[in-house]
Amino acid sequence: MVIRKNISQILLGFVLLSTGCTEFIEPSIEKKAVVLLAPSHGTESAVYAQTFWWEEVDNAFQYRLQVVTPDFNNTARLILDTVVTKNRFSYTLDPGNYEWRVRAENGSSQTLYSKAAFIIQPSSIEGQQVQLQSPVNNLITNQNSTVFKWLKLFGADKYQLQIDTSNFEDDAALFFDKSTPNQEFTVNLTKDKVYRWRVKAINATVESKWSTIQNVTVDKTPPGVVFLTSPTNEQVVTKNVTLKWEALAEAKKYQLYVFKTDGTSVYSSTFPIILTAATYSFTEGKSGEKLFWQVRAIDEAGNFGAFSELRSFLIQ
């Protein structure tokens, strides 16, 4: 019975040790392969905006995507070299011969590259779409000035940028409507609103389709004042003390200050600290010290709210 018990303990220890190791040792992906989906090898297309798409690789954190012309054996020009976390990426190309490749990566290993060649045939811009770059869709910002950017479309002489606060229902009432030979335009968005924007390409004879419509929200209104809950003002506490406050619906994060006994000098280089939760465990401080603290909210646009009241607590 004793022998069986000892064997069981040894086996249990081995299982626990094995389980613990998998939590710390990152699996190698070097023997795996990335399966390319589109554009597949030998594809010919008259669409300038291509979406590069591949199957996800287990335990990969990111993917390196490269595109060259005409191919990797006789490279004339590097078109694209980027790292992405998703398994697709869109980019607009000129007519020509291309080869693309992808490898999966994690913190300690990477796969070999998988590659495929394809051809973009010349076509009228009438059937094409401009690809928007920035601001990213659904951006929330507190900046007045916004730079709108898009990718070049082969065959275009200029681009028309439209911005509206409704749904482009009335061309005579648009917030902004101008053309430019460039691939960007800076616009002042003056009010707290949701702005919708789109771009189309134009040449001497035809126009492209409108791009997809993307949104950018301007929000310059600061969040409300944070209400501190515990400890109460001048409360005597034991070390370590948990600082708590009421969460605000409009707050994305919080800025917490802890001050020394003078009420103005930050307690340490830890502060101010940015937090996402409405609580913080303060582990510093000495017995007999009286410390002060206050919090303010920060919303998604980056607006800072007013500070809460300044409270103190005394460490026993």
Image: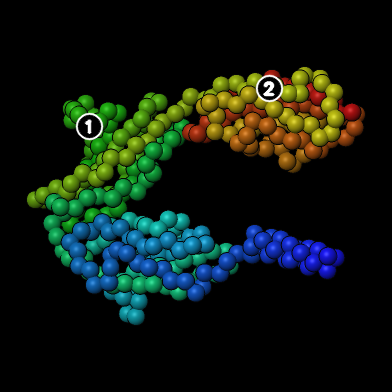
Query: Could you say which is closer to the camera, residue 204 or residue 295?
Result: 295
Could you tell whether 214 is left or right of 262 in the image? left
Disc 1 crowd rating (10 Å Cα; few below 14, some 14-19, many 20+) is: some
**Disc assigned to residue 267:** none
User: Which marked residue is nearer to the observer: mark 1 or mark 2?
Assistant: 2
Disc 2 crowd rating (10 Å Cα; few below 14, some 14-19, many 20+) is: many
Which residue sits at x=16%, y=63%? 122
Q: Residue furthest left?
A: 205
Instruction: Find numbered disc 2 in the image and state the secondary structure of the residue it sits on.
Output: strand
Q: Residue furthest bottom?
A: 73
Give above or below for 73 relative to 49: below
Residue 17 visible to an observer of this rendering: no
Distance from the alpha carbon under mark 1 to that under mark 2: 45 Å
Q: Amino acid at mark 1?
A: Phe
Picture coordinates of residue 277, whole percent (x, y)? 63, 34
Q: Amino acid at mark 2?
A: Leu
Q: Residue furthest front?
A: 1
Query: Could you say which is closer to the camera, residue 263 or residue 92?
Result: 92
Picture coordinates of residue 41, whole percent (x, y)? 27, 72
Which residue sits at x=45%, y=74%? 112
Determine which residue is flagged by label 1: 168
Quadrant occupied by the N terminus:
bottom right
**Disc assigned to residue 228:** 2
Which residue sits at x=30%, y=63%? 38
Residue 268 visible to an observer of this rendering: yes
Instruction: Find numbered disc 1 in the image and state the secondary structure of the residue it sits on.
Output: loop
Could you tell whether 246 is left or right of 215 in the image? right
